[in-house]
Amino acid sequence: MDSLKLYLKYIAINLKSELEYKTSFLLTFINQSITFFTNYFVILSLFTKFSSLNEYTVYQILLIFSIIQFGYSMNEVFARGIDHFSHLIIKGDLDRLLTRPRSLILQALGCEIDFTKTTKIIQSVILLIYSLIKLHLNLTPLKVFTLFFMLLASSVIFFNIFLMGAAFCFITTQGLEVVNVFTDGGRDMAQYPMNIYNKYFKFFFTFFIPFSLINYYPFQYLIGKSNYSLFAFLPLLVLLYLLPAIYLFNRGLHKYTSTGS
């Protein structure tokens, strides 16, 4: 409970800080909106040439697009401090955080919260609702839970990748572009159902970085392409992906040598 209160204070402080420059905040907010719709129009442009993509309709693609974008955007807003963890090490601020009797991950999360990107979360939700309306899905209670699990898992998987990138910072603060292959690249790849890719690609993103537990198996059940109800619970397995991410982060932290600041 104390950690939650502390994090809410972090949110309030970051919001107050960003609103000190209202014009800058507004212009950045608008820019982020345009960026989101650029990706949206890419998909629409694709379907002006093709009526379907591997038997998926435009609204089915937009549904999975909105789920993946929601998870990524949640992390862009609330986990930016983890994504920029290397800055704490380079500037020597990590030593200061380590002297405080609070979780390092919690403090890193509170260091940077980017509210200008909340527009992407809002747009993702709007697009999600729009896609569901157009698809006329029979949303049983289990399918509603499936959708909720997919949104949760989408947020968790990108947080895990950010956290693994932060663990990598203890080894080197350079070469972090590798992480972007799985964050930005993972977002762009996972906004399409996994079975449009070849089997080796699908294998990697099932057992190593389990995007297919979000954008393929439960998605098949959600849109009615499969009646296998066990698929509805597969997104929960993504939560297990937290364990190696936290382990690697703690291992890296134990090997960290202070900057002396």
Image: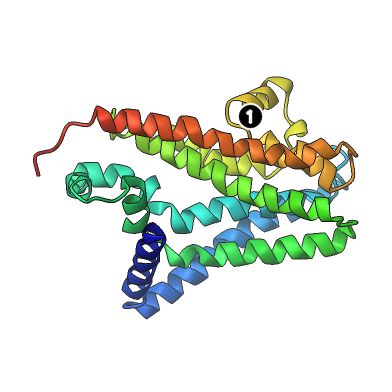
Task: Answer with the quarter of the image where residue 234 lies.
Answer: top right
Element carrying mark 1:
helix
Q: Quadrant of residue 252?
A: top left
In screen coordinates, is 221 left or right of 255? right
Give the side of residue 95 with respect to residue 82, left or right. left
**13 to the left or right of 37:** left
Horizontal arrangement in the rendering, residue 225 relative to residue 167 (left or right): right
* Whole-percent x, y for residue 217 in the image: 77, 36
Spot the residue most to the front. 1
Residue 42 shows in this picture: no
Query: In the rendered image, is residue 102 in sight?
Result: yes
Most distant residue in the left direction: 260
Disc tally is 1
Q: Amino acid at mark 1?
A: Phe
- In what quadrant of the picture does the C terminus appear? top left
Q: Position of residue 212 (x, y in %)?
A: 69, 34
- Residue 79, position as x, y percentages in the image: 43, 52
226 or 63: nearer the viewer = 226
Query: Going 29% across and 51% down the picture, which residue do you hit?
Result: 102
Eyeballing the image, is 49 above or below 186? below
- The spot of residue 254 in percent (x, y) is 26, 29
Residue at horizontal 66 percent and vertical 40 percent from the top? 236
Quadrant position of the N terminus in the picture = bottom left
Q: Nearer the viewer, residue 216 or 99?
A: 99
Residue occupied by mark 1? 205
Residue drawn 38% across the image and 79% down it: 22
Taking the spot 84% from the left edge, 42% from the top edge, the residue there is 221
Q: In this orientation, which residue lies closer to the viewer: 194 or 242?
A: 242
Image coloring type? rainbow
